[in-house]
Amino acid sequence: MNTWFPIEHSTDRLAPSSRAALDVAPDALLSLRLRARFNETLLTFRQLMLAFAVLVIIFALFLGKALYLQTFEGDAYRAVAEQNRTRTLVLPATRGVMYDSQGRQLVQNAPAFTLVITPSELPSERSERLSVLEEAARLADLSPTDLDLAIANDSGKEGDAIPVDLPLSYESALKLYLAEERLPGISAELFTVRSYEEGPLSALSHVLGYTGFISPEEYEAKRASGYQRTDKLGKQGLEASYETILRGSPGTRTVEVNALGRSETLIRKEEPVAGYNLRLTLDGELSLFIEERLAASLSVIGKRRGTVIVLNPRDGGVRALVSTPGYDNNAFAEGISPNVYRALLEDEDRPMFPRAVMGEFPPGSTFKPTVAAIALEDGLISEKTSFLSTGGVAVASWFFPDWKAGGHGTTNVVKAIAESVNTFFYIIGGGLGDFRGLGIERITEQAKLFGFGEPTGIDLPEEANGFLPSKAWKEEVKGERWYIGDTYHAAIGQGDILVTPLQMAVATSVLANGGVLFEPHLLASTERNGVEIQFEPVVRSGEVMSRETISVVRRGMRQAVTEGSARSLALLPKPVAGKTGTAQAGGDRENHAWFTSFGPYENPELVVTVLIEEGGEGSAVAAPLARDIYAWWFANR
């Protein structure tokens, strides 16, 4: 209600002065109203100005950010936008293949499908994710566990694709392709697998090796070199040693994609460059023959483990390197199941173990030619130096026997090698009476010149050192001082000395070729686009020992074939030389059977070294196998 009316009706009751005041009230009130309205307008104007100022500041910030992004990060964001518009696909290079010395292809490339999981593209809902994996496993004819293990065992980044390294048939790949719209994160990809043409046996499995999908750890180490998470690479053998040149250089294919991510237009393409093909020093046919004969020899004596190495003493080329038991490297190339892999690892005969280069064994009497050469070169003995063998050597309360009861009579170095006379090597190794022997330091120091005690340098990923003992080692490790008996044992290849079969073959090559120590090698040449590059043999020492020294030792090894323990090779069509060995394996195990040799005697083409683990006497088992290898070579090469 308007308050002016009651006041207006009661003016007659007021004093004159009050009425006068009321007479001017309307003008004052009007002024107050105008002032209030002005203040309200002024406040509104200020609010508007403040709001405008805030808007200007916000606009300025946005404009500044836009200018910053345009000026400093424009290239990066344009690249992102370009990536959203384009896709760059990696084009893998054709992996180089391998040929043997006769031109026989040992490795081929074959197309194969593989199931690939991209975890970041799988449904986030657990039930949907499980449903997708179960359906994918069903279509791929795999178990869901196989897929779960592939994901669980992968430690790569979340967005990385994970190949399931198990065989996938063409039919299964087609089913997955047709179902890919309802299986996010699942795809069937076409890869190349290696096929190893080795025949029914596995003679070359340890040498050639195999390839497999890159592991997360390998990927992190090699991604800077252009490897992809779904690449395959060499895992063992020559596949691993020559990974860089076999792999080649991948290419790229960049395409423009539509809103659905499907390619529409080819923008650019860089062709991949194929890897180099390798021609090897290996003779595949010889290797298969050796494995067949080795298997037969082992079967006769009820054994399962053995090694044969054939070298070219003229340049160190490896003609054959066979370890048995072996394994089927095709199983790894195609994707080996966990159960099969576990069975290989748990096999007590260790079929995946490359015993030719990694096995370490006491060499027995095959070490005697090396000790004889050291003593001759040192001037300790000459070809005419003789000692009487009566059945052994007695030192204080110890007796060190010859293998022949009653001994061998008066013995010089040639006879000592031919008949493997322990007494002779006891004396030149450790001394007896007034005759001062070489001593362990001189034996081990000079044995290194023949390649013992360190890797030979063969072009394979792994190689054992072997072992040459010393006085300091025995005191530190065994807590015992060195005795003369330790030196006696070392001089006949027993005690703590360990060698690999390859080291023994290399040392024998030094005697065969007149004193040159080569690094053994499997690569003969590389080839790409019709251009072949020859491998240059590596000479570690041009003269390990004088030709005079080596000539005496060679005569002893030749006499071992004509008159001594290796007479099973005497009737070969061409003369050969060799040395048998029967090495104590220790404990309750039977002796190892050794034989190392070269031929033809005057102009050697081959060095043949045989080791039959726990095979007994070298003359009975190892030497006859070497005889068959020479007979095959002389008839076929």
Image: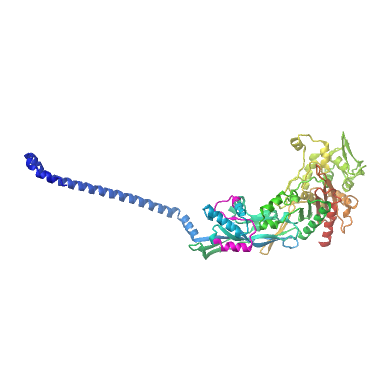
582 or 151, which is in the foreground? 151
The quadrant in which residue 271 appears is bottom right
Residue 460 locus on image (x, y percent)? 71, 52
39 or 347, which is in the foreground? 347
Say which quadrant the C terminus sits in: bottom right
Q: Is 254 colored magenta in this rendering?
A: no
* Span shown in magenta: 151-180
Q: Is residue 220 visible?
A: no
Residue 572 locus on image (x, y percent)? 87, 57
Residue 191 locus on image (x, y percent)? 62, 60
Describe residue 601's horizontal placement relative to residue 152 as left or right: right
Colouring method of the image: rainbow
Q: Is residue 208 visible?
A: yes
- Count of number-bearing discs: 0
Q: Residue at x 50, y 58 (%)?
A: 83
Describe residue 309's horizontal placement relative to residue 263 as left or right: right
Q: Residue at x 87, y 56 (%)?
A: 575
- Tell me if residue 26 comes above or below residue 575 in the rendering: above
336 or 72, which is in the foreground? 336
Residue 579 locus on image (x, y percent)? 85, 49
Q: Residue furthest bottom?
A: 265
- Tell me if residue 187 comes above or below residue 35 in the rendering: below
